[in-house]
Image: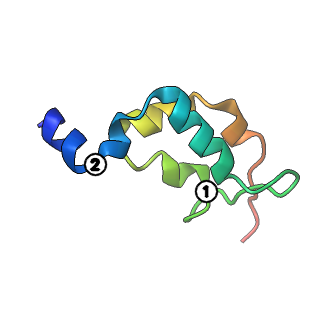
Amino acid sequence: QKRLNAYIYPVLILPTEIVFEIFVHFLPPYPHPPPLAGFNSPTSLAQICRQWRDIAFATPGLWRAIDLRD
């Protein structure tokens, strides 16, 4: 199953360092914080798969600031 997933979704086998860089570029530029939930939030990255969740929660820069307003 893992080999099939890697074939169908090659993005899931990217090295952690590459995924980290993608995550950092996903955020809006400082000082604009991302929303807590929704498409542009760090939590949306953590919902892709287990590997991405682990990387997202281990990336302090994603959580530097969160916009809690509606």
At horizontal 83% and vertical 58% (from top left) the residue drawn is 32
What residue do we see at 59% from left, 60% from top?
37
Q: Amino acid at mark 1?
A: Ser
Callout 2 crowding tier (Cα within 10 Å): few <14, some 14–19, many ≥20: few
In the image, is 21 to the left or to the right of 53? right
Disc with the residue nearer the chain's start (2 vs 1): 2
Give me the residue at 67% from left, 48% from top: 25
Q: Is 62 on the left or on the right of 64, as rendered?
A: left
Q: Are marks 2 and 1 in contact (CB under 8 Å)?
A: no
Q: Residue 3, percent across and down?
A: 15, 34
Q: Position of residue 53 (x, y in %)?
A: 45, 38
Residue 9: numbered disc: 2
On screen, residue 26 versus residue 3, left or right, reads right
Circle 1 Cα neighbour tier, 10 Å, few/some/many (<14 / 14–19 / ≥20): many
Marks 2 and 1, how far apart at CA: 22 Å
Which residue does the numbered mark 1 point to in the structure image?
Answer: 41
